[in-house]
Image (tube, rainbow, N blue to C red):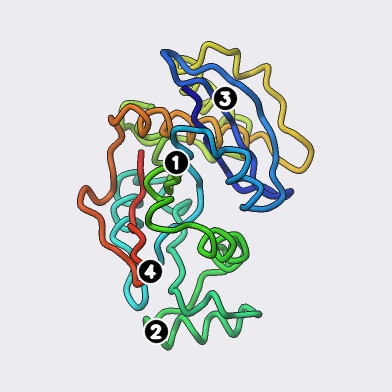
Amino acid sequence: MDVAGVDGCKAGWLTARVDATGRLRIRGISVSTTFQELLDSTSDCAAVAVDVPIGLPDNTPRQADVLARRAIGPRRSSVFPAPMRATLDANTYEEACALSEAASGRKLSKQTFAILPKIREADMLVTPALQDRVVEVHPEVSFWALNGRRTLEFWKRKPRGAQERLRILAPAFEDTISALRSPKGAALDDLYDACAAAWTAGRIAYGTAERLPPAPDFDSAGLRMEIVY
């Protein structure tokens, strides 16, 4: 049974496709340039876990983000607040901040604005029906769960952070994760994040995944606002 873990990267969407029967086995590592291409390439997967906000609030912070930040503690800054739905129409950071402030009283973070095109791309294609198979994850939450619900010590883009994540991933995979190489347009931390998301996708396929919050809220488009791990 194949599943996929997906992380946004410079070139588009980095996908770790794995066989989730028993310990995970890498089927392939690839990059899709568009979200539609990603959906097409994983249409036969039992579950697809994507690191992108799915389900956007109208005027208040998502409970999923609040709980995720609380869970991972010192690594909480890696969970960017999901943007207000109104900001999807923005063309500039200033416009996005104005739309966000009008909707919620808060400006948009620069980190969230940087990934707004990817959020917009996913929001255009994910439907409530598709969300039964294509779900939102956050790699730091997946790593936290993989690590016995203990917070990771080091930032992922530092050498010690990469080593820490490699150590946590290794027992879940039959493959030698350290031998994997990132495709052009993706970084090593993108690869490890995609592998962590694939671990969560396996849990989704077998019905053992958990969610923040356990009973999700729904946005105005009928999408669940949740982070799965």
The percent coordinates of residue 102 (x first, y second) are 42, 88
Q: Quadrant of residue 204?
A: top left
Q: Between marks 4 and 2, how big is the CA–CA gap? A: 17 Å
Q: Which mark is residue 221?
A: 4
Residue appearing at x 34%, y 46% in the figure? 73
Secondary structure, mark 3, is helix
The kind of residue tagged 4 is Ala
User: Furthest-right residue in view?
Assistant: 184
Say if mark 3 contacts mark 1, CB within 8 Å: no
Residue 198 position (above or below residue 33): above
Residue appearing at x 51%, y 63% in the figure? 123
- What residue did someone put label 1 on? 140
Q: Which mark is residue 103?
A: 2
User: Furthest-left residue in view?
Assistant: 215
Disc nearer the start of the sequence (3/2): 2
Q: Is 37 in front, or is 58?
A: 37
Disc nearer the start of the sequence (3/4): 3
Q: Residues within 10 Å of mark 3 (few under 14, many from 20)?
A: some
Q: Between marks 3 and 4, how big is the CA–CA gap? A: 40 Å
Residue appearing at x 41%, y 28% in the figure? 202
- What residue did someone put label 3 on? 163
Disc nearer the start of the sequence (1/2): 2
